[in-house]
Amino acid sequence: MAGHITNTISRWFGAFADHAFPSSLQTLINRTYVNVMGLDMREFAPPETYPTLNKLFTRELRKERPVDRASEAFISPVDALVTECGRLKEDQALQIKGMSYSVEALLTETYEEGAGRLRKGSYINFYLSPRDYHRYHVPCRMRVLSALHRPGALYPVNMPSLRKRKNLFVENERVILECRTDKGGTFFMVLVGALNVGKMTLRFDPRIHTNAQAESPTLYRYDDKPVILEKGEELGMFKMGSTVLVFAEPGLLDVEVARGRKVRFGERVGRLTER
């Protein structure tokens, strides 16, 4: 799937967004994007200070966000719209109301055993629009056991696409993180690529390169060097908007947010239960 036209388009757009134009033209490009997309820049540097459009996309917060530090609090890893959430029906999650997909297919055969443990568990879908803050963070203190880069297409993941393309998340390129909480519970975070999302990055492992013409899945394990991350820590970034999916095994996460809710990184969206 790495040769899909959506990947090619995304690489072309990525090259444009990474190019530093003369300062006056770059300022015009940046300000136009801010105005057209309706970006709220109050937490960020002025648009004209970003040397490329991608630097604007991946803008860093200028001051620290409040984070719910309660040990049981599971925070939103992103600024996003919750498009679906709740309990899995066996291994089925909703892509959008009335359209479901298999979590086992999403996680691939690599995590077949882990997908089995998720049956009747809980999930949250976070959609980042092009106007949102594009960095993702750690939702609770956790250990990353492994990461899988699964090449695929880069179809748009906006609401119209969610309604018309079945198995969208399963078809798109993604990075799957197998995670464990302090109490020993297992959950998965899935970073889903989308049209014009040329790259997804992970700060703890720069080896992972997305939309890089890879043809087969690549698994990274962290048995010898444990990757332990703190709640609120920056995990990585999308270079454009996309989606983060969270799946927790039964009895681990009580979802405390509703479909259609706009959430911000740092706020509580669920409660971790004792294992």
Image (cartoon, helix red, strand yellow):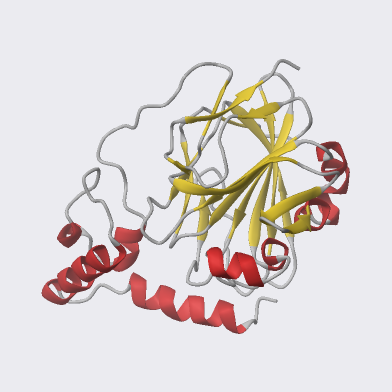
Give percent across and percent down for residue 107.
77, 53
Q: Residue at x 56, y 39 (%)?
A: 258
Q: Nearer the viewer, residue 149 or 86?
A: 86
Q: Which residue extends farthest bottom? A: 5
> Taking 24 as reference, is 43 left or right?
right
Q: Residue at x 28, y 56 (%)?
A: 39
> Taking 144 as reference, is 28 left or right?
left
Give percent across and percent down for residue 265.
43, 38
Q: On screen, 241 above or below 221? A: below
Quadrant where the N terminus lies? bottom right
Number of callouts in the render? 0
Give percent across and percent down for residue 78.
47, 43
| Residue 222 seen in the current view | no
Q: Residue at x 43, y 45 (%)?
A: 79
Q: On screen, 174 above or below 245? A: below
Quadrant where the C terminus lies? top right
Give percent across and percent down for residue 29.
22, 73
Quarter of image, res 74: top right
